[in-house]
Image: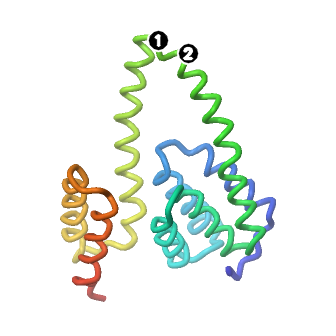
Amino acid sequence: MSNVRVSLLRLGLTFVLYANLTFGGGSATVATIRRAIVDRNRWLPEEDFSHVFAIARLTPGTNLLAFCCGIGWLLRGWWGAVITLLAASIPCAVITATVMATIDVLARNALFTAGLRGAMATAVGVTAVTCWTIVKPNVSRATQWRVLAVAAAALVAQAAIPPFYVLLAAGAVGFLFPRKT
């Protein structure tokens, strides 16, 4: 658990805001939460945040909710985990249901569907930038080419190989060729 005592209200409001109103998917949300929790408020050190992120990525199901629970657990124990889970899931479920009902009505409009295609292209770019934001603190000048090579190989491999095996291979590369410190 963290040495910083965050109120449950402040923790919940932080996750309502950043887990529900960040565009770009789970990676963008994690990067935004990282800026709030690690950089701005200094509730957790970078290492603890990275550990929760890594463990959440290994859990089955919705990784973002596992991540939110892990952060909540480190900051406030069981109550923190419950608060962050509810704050990260209930508002966005209501927002998603509302948006999907609206999209269902608008899907018959050609201009709307063209805009939706543009939004999808933007989401890919936002995801790429977010991934770099998360990885950047762990990349040095000596390891940047290795990181780019592994990322490129994973991108190519995912077209033909299930993501689980791509992650397994990336873990094996990291284990067999550890970063020199």
Q: Is mark 2 on a helix, strand or loop?
A: helix
The residue tagged 2 is 105
Percent position (x, y) of residue 94? 68, 37
Q: In this view, does 135 lie above or below 61?
A: below
Quadrant occupied by the C terminus: bottom left
Percent position (x, y) of residue 33? 58, 58
Residue at image location 31% in from the left, 74% down from the top: 171
Q: What kind of residue is marked 1?
A: Arg
Q: Is mark 1 on a helix, strand or loop?
A: loop
Q: Is residue 176 above or below residue 160?
A: below
Residue at image location 56% in from the left, 45% down from the top: 22
Position of 128 compared to 158: left or right? right
- Crowding at label 1, few (<14), some or many (≥20) Cα neighbours within 10 Å? few
Q: Which mark is residue 108?
A: 1
Q: What kind of residue is marked 2?
A: Val
Mark-to-mark CA distance, 2 and 1? 7 Å
Residue at image location 73% in from the left, 75% down from the top: 77
Quadrant occupied by the N terminus: bottom right
Q: Is residue 74 above or below residue 106?
A: below
